[in-house]
Image (spheres, grey):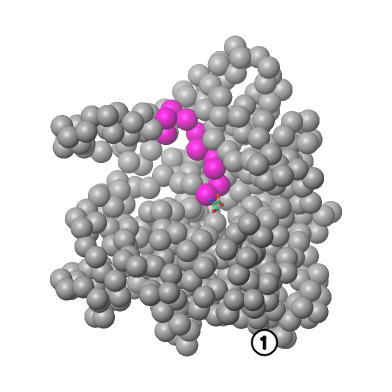
Amino acid sequence: MDYKNLEKTDPDTLAIIQKEEKRQETELEMIASENYVSSAVLEAMASVLNNKYSEGYPGKRYYGGNQVIDEIEILAQTRAKKIFGAEHVNVQPLSGSPANAAVYMAFLKPGDKVLGLKLDHGGHLSHGHKVNFSGMLYDFVQYEVDEKTGYIDMDEVEKLALKEKPKMIVAGFSAYSREIDWERFKEIADKIGAYTFADIAHTAGLIAAGVMKNPVSYFDVVSTTTHKTLRGPIGAMIMCREEHAKKVDRAVFPGMQGGPHEHITAAKAVSFLEADTEDFKNYAKQTILNAQALSNEMIKLGYKVISDGTDNHLIVVDMNSKSLSGKEAEVVLENIGISVSRSTIPNDPNPPMNPSGIRIGTAALTTRGMQEKEMKQIAKWIDSSVGNKENPEYLENIKKDVEKLSKEFPLPSSK
Ligand code: DSN
């Protein structure tokens, strides 16, 4: 990026931004919810659209001067509808949790019963955890993955749904590596007249590319962030059938939010256009192949991968298999220039701040052009650094190798 104005006005802030640029260029980002966006997405975010307030919706704003802003919002909606096959899209949610809050507000009343995946089984905080608004405001009942297989136990989901009769069933996750059986969720919900809500934040890019199943046409409502596998700006959106459009829009504004961030809306529009290309499809396919290569290599090296593999962009590894905690593993890997996030494992005996596993994702490195060969190498580095965690000199040498590989695959924004 060209920072000539920032350089004059605020060299201190610029110095920090450039330090982060260097970190991203010389290290490997394997946090499953992160990615590297294109220069075009970055430029849209840095535009004068930042200067405008636009509470309301196209044609119905509470501020004057929004004719041009209407165009950008309509463009983002149109592109999102195309790549997901959605009837209605709200592109204003600021991020994943506010989007989910708006979904609950649109369809439920406080105290209503909802079914969601338990946090330590891969669910998200906003799927009913007790420390989150979702668990405080709504009566969540939590389903789990099967302890032996690591897959969501759909028979248990059905039993729980028939017994509890929730008003809504949430299907979606933050740390689950298998395809979701959307059709079965829908069948179960239909038996009890429950709303179906899919949170596809993690796999939206893979779904838009057609390499994972898409629930958008038959679920009542679908939320997603735009910055994970979808590779857009940090933000979110909600898709729903036309019959729910009014209540979803009302819940986002004025229900949850004030002015939308229209510079981010513009960047969303850019990323939706980018997602509608052959290049993006290839990236999505390769992301999954890379996660599978990484998983296979980790298993060969003696690690327990939850569910014994992956259908998507992430794996969850039980670090008990190597006698260290997820937090310790996260720190060791940070020291060699690989970022991952600690993660709970199903029925984790340890708390979320110090859980037993790590979650590793391949979307960001696939964006940089890495393939199976690099994934195998990375698995070996992960293993040897864990095995030599008390040996700073050894770790320093691996860090140099990580940096060398990293520099061979520049970020899309530095090409
Ligand atoms: N930060 C997201 C993730 O890592 O999955 C969840 O909020």
Q: Residue at x 62, y 65 (%)?
A: 136
Asked if residue 25 can be seen in this view, the reply is no
Identify the magenta region: 23-33
Instruction: Judge from the rendering whether residue 103 lies leftward or rightward of residue 327; answer left or right.
Output: left
Residue 395: % across, % down = 60, 18
The N terminus lies in quadrant: top left
Tally of marks: 1
Quarter location, residue 356: top right
Residue type pointed to by label 1: Gly
Instruction: Judge from the rendering whether residue 256 lies leftward or rightward of residue 9; answer left or right.
Output: right
Name the outermost residue toward the right: 148
Residue under numbered circle 1 = 193
Residue 207: % across, % down = 52, 63
Q: Residue at x 52, y 28 (%)?
A: 337
Q: Residue at x 84, y 54 (%)?
A: 148
Would you place residue 107 above or below residue 33 in this image? below
User: Does the magenta segment cover residue 224?
Assistant: no
Asked if residue 248 can be seen in this view, the reply is yes
Q: Secondary structure at mark 1?
A: loop
